[in-house]
Structures are given as C-alpha cells and as structure tokens.
C-alpha cells in the first residue's frame, strides 16, 4: 500500500512593513493573497499539476494581523472531486518572541487541476483517515449545495446605471508583477484588488476609514491575462447598523478592443472603526430605484443562503438596520 501524498502545507513568515495597509495593520486583501498562495501550494502538491483558483468561500476577518507578527497560513485538503480540491485555510499570527498564535481568519478555497491545454484533469482522491478529517470532509460536502444556490442567485442579478447607491470603478492594466506560476494573474492579486475597491466605495459612503470583516463567494469565472485592461467595480447594495455590504465585479479584456468579460464576483462587508478598533454605526442607505431595491433584496438573500452553511453567521449589527 503506497503512502498518500501530503495533504497539508503551512507557510510561515513575518508580516513586513510593506504589508501594512490603509487600516494601519495588514489589510484583508493581503491576507487573501496569503490564503491563495498557501492553498495553491497544497493543491499543486496534491495534484502534481498546475492548478487555478475556482472559488473562495466565506472568510471572516476577526482580529487584525499586525506588522512584525509571525504569521502561519495552514492549507489542508479536506475533499476532492474529479478535478477539484477543497482546501481549508487557517491564518494565525502572534508575537515572534514566543507565545501562542491567535487564529485571525479561516475559509474554504477550491482549486481545479488543469493540463497544458487549460482543461481540467483528474486528481488523486482524498480519503479521510481520522475522525477530524471526516468531519472536515462532511463540512465541505454540506457547503456544496449552499455554494450552488449562491452562484445561481448571483447569476440572476443585473447591475446597470439605474442604481443610485455609492459606486466606484478602478481601472488599470494587469502588470507583469501580477503574474502567477502559470503566466496568469493569480487569484490572490485579484482578491487584493477587490478589497481595495470595496475600501474606496465604503469609505466614500461613510466618510471614514473602513476595513473588511467578511468576504463571501469569491467566484472566478475565467483567467485574467497580463496586459489586460482591468475594471474593478464596487457598489453599495445594503447597510446594516454597522456593516456596509459591497458587491464587487472584476472585468477584463484586451486593450485593443472594447469587450470586457466578467472575471470575478464577490460580496464584501466593510465596517468603519474608531481609534480603539471597534466598529461604529454608519448612516443607513435607503434604496430609491427598482434596481436599488432588487439588489438590496439580493444582498439579504445571499446572507440567508450563507446562514445555512456551518459557521457562516455574521453578527446582527452587521446585518440589521436596527
């Protein structure tokens, strides 16, 4: 009987001054970039082939990672489909001089193994060997139906100029420094762009510095190429008492024509914080047009769907306007 390949990878490093973001600590976008790299390492180690990010599940950002922290990003395969690998990632950090590390965030990432032609290829099947591995596999399986409902709800929506909510669009070209090991823009960079656009949108709306506390359903539809024109659109769709729900679409295309294709979509929840780091109330947004109301209802629907998956409940003050 052959020994199964390693199904877990842990990256360890110090959070450097170049990782500091607009919040004064490490931004959510940088944490997501770390998550993507660790999950990629676990995926290619298991599949023995190039892999692409397909989906990043709901990720809650608890306490921030500070500059100088010793960071650990653990990525563990918990379930495999024919060509997909479901990878649980946990980000922890603490004082490098010693003491226990504190978990900062966790989420489920799905990678797909692809061949030289870019088509999915089979991967070795993961079989749990402990009670904990069986529980994690069952949790991943329970999320599949929820994820399909989220994708269906997202695909049914249309975003036009009829909306009146706060909206920002960032435009730039994908640079060679954004490339991954397969010659495409890696998912972590795209998620960093998403966090930046959500920050600008939320901060303009409330007039304060903001940080992400949750990102949900980051779905990657197609690869983004170096040299593409990139458009990252962030739009406010719902407010709770403290949370601003921002829908973000990433589109890209060849600069030689005007066609832009949807690359990635997700919903991010941002909060404004006081000097102590506590979330503070923000002005409620009131929908005006039919599109405003439709997207407002869509945001609530996504929250209700996500609430059916294990461990995905957001605090009430981020959800409710009261």
Image: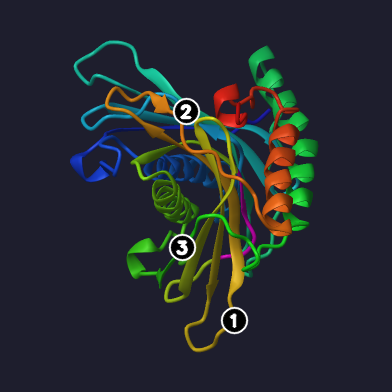
* Outermost residue, top side: 99
Q: Nearer the viewer, mark 3 or mark 1?
A: 1
Secondary structure found at label 1: loop
Give the residue drawn at x 78%, y 44%. Answer: 148
The residue segment tinted magenta is 217-223
Badge 3 density bin: few <14, some 14–19, many ≥20, Cα 10 Å: many
Residue 165 at x, y percent in the picture: 56, 55
- Is-magenta flag for residue 130? no
Instruction: State left or right for residue 275 relative to residue 294.
Output: left
Q: Nearer the viewer, mark 1 or mark 2?
A: 1
Task: Give the mark nearest the N terminus, 3 or 2.
Answer: 2
Q: Which residue is mark 1?
A: 259
Q: Is residue 213 above or below residue 133?
A: below
Is residue 321 among what the camera can see?
Answer: yes
Q: Which mark is residue 105?
A: 2
Residue 6 at x, y percent in the picture: 54, 32
The quadrant of the picture occupied by the C terminus is top right
Q: Which mark is residue 185?
A: 3
Task: Give the mark nearest the N terminus, 1 or 2.
Answer: 2
Q: Nearer the viewer, mark 3 or mark 2?
A: 2
Q: Nearer the viewer, residue 157 or 32?
A: 157
């Amino acid at each position: 009987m052959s020994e199964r390949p390693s199904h877990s990878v842990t990256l360890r490093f110090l959070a450097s001054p170049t990782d500091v973001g607009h919040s004064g600590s490490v931004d959510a976008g940088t944490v997501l970039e770390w998550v993507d790299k660790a999950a990629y390492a676990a995926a290619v180690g298991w599949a023995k082939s190039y892999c692409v990010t397909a989906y990043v599940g709901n990720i809650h950002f608890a306490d921030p990672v500070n500059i100088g922290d010793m960071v650990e990003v653990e990525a563990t395969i918990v379930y495999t489909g024919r060509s997909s690998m479901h990878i649980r990632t946990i980000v922890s950090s603490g004082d490098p001089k010693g003491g226990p590390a504190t978990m900062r965030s966790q989420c489920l990432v799905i990678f797909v193994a692809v061949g030289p032609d870019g088509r999915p290829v089979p991967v070795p099947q993961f079989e749990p060997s402990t009670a904990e591995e069986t529980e994690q596999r069952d949790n991943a399986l329970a999320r599949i139906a929820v994820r399909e409902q989220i994708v269906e709800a997202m695909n049914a929506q249309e975003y036009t100029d009829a909306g009146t909510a706060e909206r920002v669009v960032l435009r730039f070209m994908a640079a060679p420094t954004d490339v991954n090991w397969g010659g495409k823009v890696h998912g972590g960079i795209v998620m960093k762009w998403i966090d930046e656009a959500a920050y600008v949108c939320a901060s303009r709306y409330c007039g304060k510095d903001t940080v992400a506390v949750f990102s949900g359903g980051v779905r990657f539809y197609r690869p983004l190429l170096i040299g593409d024109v990139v458009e990252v659109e962030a739009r406010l769709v719902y407010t709770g008492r403290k949370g601003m729900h921002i829908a973000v679409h990433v589109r890209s295309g060849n600069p030689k024509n005007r066609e832009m294709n949807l690359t990635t979509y997700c919903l991010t929840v941002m909060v404004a914080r006081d000097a102590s780091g506590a979330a503070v109330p923000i002005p409620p947004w009131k929908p005006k047009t039919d599109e405003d109301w439709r997207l407002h209802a869509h945001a609530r629907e996504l929250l209700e769907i996500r609430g059916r998956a294990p461990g995905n409940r957001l605090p009430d003050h981020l959800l409710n306007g009261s």
